[in-house]
Each structure stands twice: as C-alpha cells, then as structure tokens.
Image (cartoon, rainbow, N blue to C red):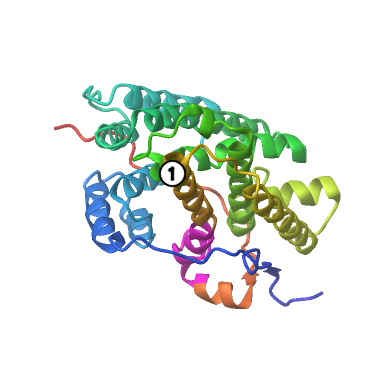
Amino acid sequence: MDARPKTIYLPDTMVNWPWPRTINPHYEDVKAEVDASFRDFKALSPELQEGFDKCDFEHLRSGCHLLNFFFFVDEYTDMENEGVAKEMVDIVLDALHNPHKIRPEGECIIGEIARRFWARAIQFASLPSQRRFLETFDEYINSVVVEARDREQGCRRSLDDYLKLRRKTIGAKPCFLIIEMEMDLPDEVFYHPVIMDLVDCITELIIIDNDMMSYNKEQAAGNEFHNLISIVMLELDLDRGSAMAWAAHYHAEVQKRFIGGLAKVPSWGPSVDVLVKEYLNGVTNWVRASYSWSFESQRYFATKGPEIQHTRLIPLLPKVSARRSQLLCAVPSA
C-alpha cells in the first residue's frame, strides 16, 4: 500500500493571461477602515474573525463593503439546508430593497450588514448601476437557495446544468457594480450581445479558477458536488489530475474567446467608448484579482498559499464534518 501523502497538481491557468495585476493606490487605507467597520458587527466567532482579518479584499470603499458582504453571505449559507438558506435570502433581499428601514431586533446580523452596505452604496452609485446590481444580485442570491436544495437532496447535476447554476452562484456579475457604479452606461451598450458575451467569458474564467482552487476544501467538507472538478470527474470518468487538466484547457479556450471578442466591440462614440474601455478593463482585472486572492487570503490554502502557488502541489485534505457553530446569527439587542 502506498503510504505517501496524496497531492493534487494545480495547473497555472493564468500563465498566458495578458493583463497584469493592478491594485488601487488607496487600497490599504480603505481596507483598514472597512475591515474595522465589519469587525464591529461581531458576526463571527474569534476563530473565524481571525481568518477573516487575514483575507485581503478589494480596494475601493464600496467594493470592500460589497466583497465583505459576499463573504458573510457565503459563510452563512454555505452548509445550510434549503429552508434556512431561504430565510436568510429573504432577510437580505428585504434589507437591500429597504435600506433605510431599521432591522428587527434578534434578526440574523446578515440583514443589517446588507442594509448598511446598500444604504452607503446608493449614495454614490449611478441609477443604472443600482438597477443592474439589484437584478443580478437577486439572481445570485436566489441561486444560493437552489444550491442549498441540491446539497440537501444530494443532487448531482450534469456538467451543462451545473455550469448554468454556477454562473449565478459564483456571484461575479453583481460584483461588477464596483466597476460600473460611477458610470451611466446605457442599456443598449450594457446589454449589447458582444459586451454580454465578454462578461460571460470573465464569469466563466472566475468559475474555473475558483472551483479549481476550492476543490480540496469542498471535497473535505463533503460539499464537492457544487464544484466543477467533481462534476467533471463524475461525468467524464476522470481522476483528479485529469479533471484539473480538463479545466485548465477549458480556461484557455474561454480566454481565446474573450480576446477574440474584444475585437468585435462596436463604437458608440468617443464619450461612451471611453466608459466601455474602462468597464472592460475592470472586469478583465477581476480574473487576475480573484486568482491572486485565492492564494493570498488563506480561505482555501491556509498559510500555504504562496508555497502552493509556487509548487502547484496541494496536499489532499481528509474528509471532515462541517461545523456551523462559528457563526453568530442574532443581532445583539441594544
């Protein structure tokens, strides 16, 4: 019997991605401010809070608040059943649609987190970006309930069905509010087929990288069937290494589709074209940002992220029982 520890080889999907990493110059100052405000919620146990503090989130203030908000949504729903997830989703949606309404005493803290984020964001976000955020966030947050139902029922989707759902649960499109919030992009531009296909490509690239990075953690927690690698292994009858290679090849194909699509972007006149260029540069940077965050945040690789990024070897984690006791749901009474 082979007693050597098992490892997973992680292909480097970004080796040929033409866009280098860029960081907002105000990142450190804004991050410190926003992290402090989230710490005041006392929504996590000391153990989870310590891990949260080690995560580096996006740079701009609203972006930091949004991504911290997404972190809490993920943590509060990731292992819950459909009923509990639906209750939390209803709280979040009510808070977003009523950002000036005081949340009920004893309600899950996620409602107040959502309310404060959106009450601040709408002070600065353009009206079109607000509308599109609520549309895409609604799609995302309701897909989380579907994922919870799948998990509760032990549902294993086909590859095509999985990707249809994953394009929503990844939550990428509502995050693009950060890029668009100061713009007034007309609907005919935002929803143009070429622009939509480019955004779909970016979403797909983020999915592939995220599922490759998170596979080890999710298989250990028993949540692997909402993960591309596990679905590919099952449907295509591949081992882990071959599934990772398949995902890397798919990533390269989507990259080609995106780069080819850039040449098809039409012109709407100089004043709009400059906004389109800025928007596309922003979503393009998101791929690199998500990739880098996965190694540096300790969410998937603990303290081994830089080492794994260098060696590309991930030690296979043993199966463990998921615990939800680290989340503190109730809003403290005043």
Identify the residue at image location x=76%, y=60%.
240
Residue farthest to the right, as pictured: 237
Q: Is residue 26 magenta?
A: no
The image position of residue 78, as x and y in percent, is 51, 41
In depth, the one of 167 and 313 nearer the eye is 167
Span of residues in magenta: 288-305
Q: Where 266 sits versus 97, above or below?
A: below
Identify the residue at image location x=67%, y=55%.
255
The quarter of the image holding the N terminus is bottom right
| Residue 328, picture quadrant | top left
Residue occupied by mark 1 = 275
Q: Give the left or right position of residue 307, taking residue 238 as reference.
A: left
Identify the residue at image location x=37%, y=30%.
130
In depth, the one of 120 and 144 nearer the eye is 120
Q: Where 135 sits versus 125, above or below?
A: above
How many numbered circles does the render carry?
Answer: 1
In depth, the one of 279 and 109 nearer the eye is 279
Q: Where 304 sits versus 110, above or below?
A: below
The image position of residue 88, as x and y in percent, is 42, 29
Identify the residue at image location x=21%, y=24%.
102
